[in-house]
Image: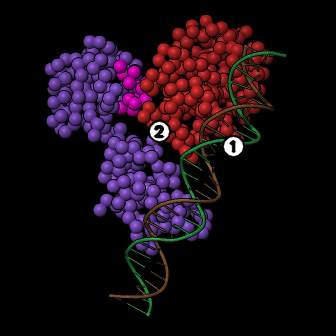
Chain colours: A purple, B red, C green, D brown
Amino acid sequence: MAAIYVVEDDQNIREIESFALKNVGYEVEDFDCAKSFYERLQHRTPMLILLDIMLPDEDGLTILKTLRSRSETRKVPIIMVTAKTTEIDKVKGLDMGADDYMTKPFGVMELISRVKALLRRSTDGGEEKSLSMGDLVLDNEKRMVYIGKEQVDLTFKEYELLKLLMRNAGIVTPRDTILDRVWGTDFEGESRTLDMHIKTLRQKLKSDGKFIKTVRNVGYIMSSD
Amino acid sequence: MAAIYVVEDDQNIREIESFALKNVGYEVEDFDCAKSFYERLQHRTPMLILLDIMLPDEDGLTILKTLRSRSETRKVPIIMVTAKTTEIDKVKGLDMGADDYMTKPFGVMELISRVKALLRRSTDGGEEKSLSMGDLVLDNEKRMVYIGKEQVDLTFKEYELLKLLMRNAGIVTPRDTILDRVWGTDFEGESRTLDMHIKTLRQKLKSDGKFIKTVRNVGYIMSSD
DNA sequence: GAAAACTTTACATGAATTTTACAGGAAAAA
DNA sequence: TTTTTCCTGTAAAATTCATGTAAAGTTTTC
């Protein structure tokens, strides 16, 4: 699971935030300036960012704008944090695309509940976007399949086939149904086409290939046991 | 469907605009002065207005302000048109709430695409100021693309294509969608037009061209890995 | 009317898909 | 159990099909 990045120059506040979040199970990385934050961003994209508006080297709003313009971070939820109540209204008014705002000082509970709410919001919106089974993940947006971190290169039919099987994980999909859904209703004549694709799929999925099981005389089923 | 109103005193330009828009299927009504325009407005509200800044009887900016103050026209998308480049900056600076700006002379294709984009925007969301991926930057305000410091010269379609791909960075955009978004709904027949533009785009982006990946049987995806 | 932008045509290329042919092995029949 | 049958797995060859590319043609811009 990705981490939460805390960007805050005040050491005290940073530690409180960091501690609170770690305490409820999140992985946290913290930064005291924009520079180190940007550097880390090169290597890892967080699942949420807690961003202070006042930083020694760069204005929080500028950072926000930059993050929103980069494809890797465009969709990362961001909570802006500021000390002044007056300032927050100004910031909100600008509507720079932050997902939430908080004024310091704030309670630990408030922080946590806002983070949770935001994460819930950002994942619920993107439902059905991916399917997974164990370490096997099918990402429907990228149209890409992963075994853990490793990317698996599938052709069109292979992908459609796997998607169908994963959608129906745990229940048998008859051959006819597969041919119908993946190849189209009017696929005529007997041939080894489907078997062929199952074979290459199993091969490409390596050890995860065993998730695809043959149900003799009926079809195939995908299940993790 | 509602119409597009073209308000422009120069007969030549008015006819070109009018003709171009009608040609792609819009219903157009045109006016050579503010007076007749206002009269017509009493009876019918258009879905978009193309408004020249210089008119014989009333200043375009005044008209704009009036339109924005009336409840019936407050939300109608408006494109301001002006002859002088210097003037457009002034107008933009004032930020009177026009939705887009164009300087004469402009190409017919640009006009149509801006109209389409604006109509789409008025139903969808807004636009980003700039997009980036690695050292590749697309500046939507300057309407310009850079590889690091170096400026890349793109044609209109190339730019729109790249913008679409970058907006959807990380997710596959199907061919149909691309044709629909960049070329317009009514693009008929199979041809290699899209491939052609992809090819030149890849060429012009040099090493960054590899960010554009083809997803066989589906479309294209832009991603940095 | 020249130049630039865009589209079409025609063909090349190579990946994806299907076919063919046969091997292997589970279930059914003897 | 043994035999037979039928279904599925596999490999290699054949074919199909989507995309890439160049060049010519058309439209648009200036």
Residue B57 in view (yes/no):
yes
- Image coordinates of residue A108 in percent, x first then y, are 17, 30
Q: Which label is found at residue B190?
A: 1
D4 over B200 or under it: above or below: below
B216 over B20 or under it: above or below: below
Comparing B60 with B209, the one in front is B209
Q: How many marks?
A: 2
Horizontal side of B141 relative to B4 (left or right) equals left
Residue at horizontal 60 percent and vertical 10 percent from the top: B88
Comparing A194 with B32, the one in front is A194
- Image coordinates of residue B2 in percent, x first then y, are 67, 33
Can you say which quadrant of the picture contains the C terminus of chain A? bottom left
Residue at horizontal 57 percent and vertical 21 percent from the top: B99
Residue A68 on the magenta span:
yes
Residue lying at the far top of the rendered structure: B86
Q: Quadrant of residue A22?
A: top left
Q: Amino acid at mark 1?
A: Glu
Both marks 1 and 2 on one chain: yes
Q: Which residue is mark 2?
A: B171
Region in magenta: A63-80
Q: CA distance from mark 1 to mark 2?
A: 24 Å
- Image coordinates of residue B35 in percent, x first then y, are 72, 16
Residue B86 on the magenta span:
no
Q: Amino acid at mark 2?
A: Ile
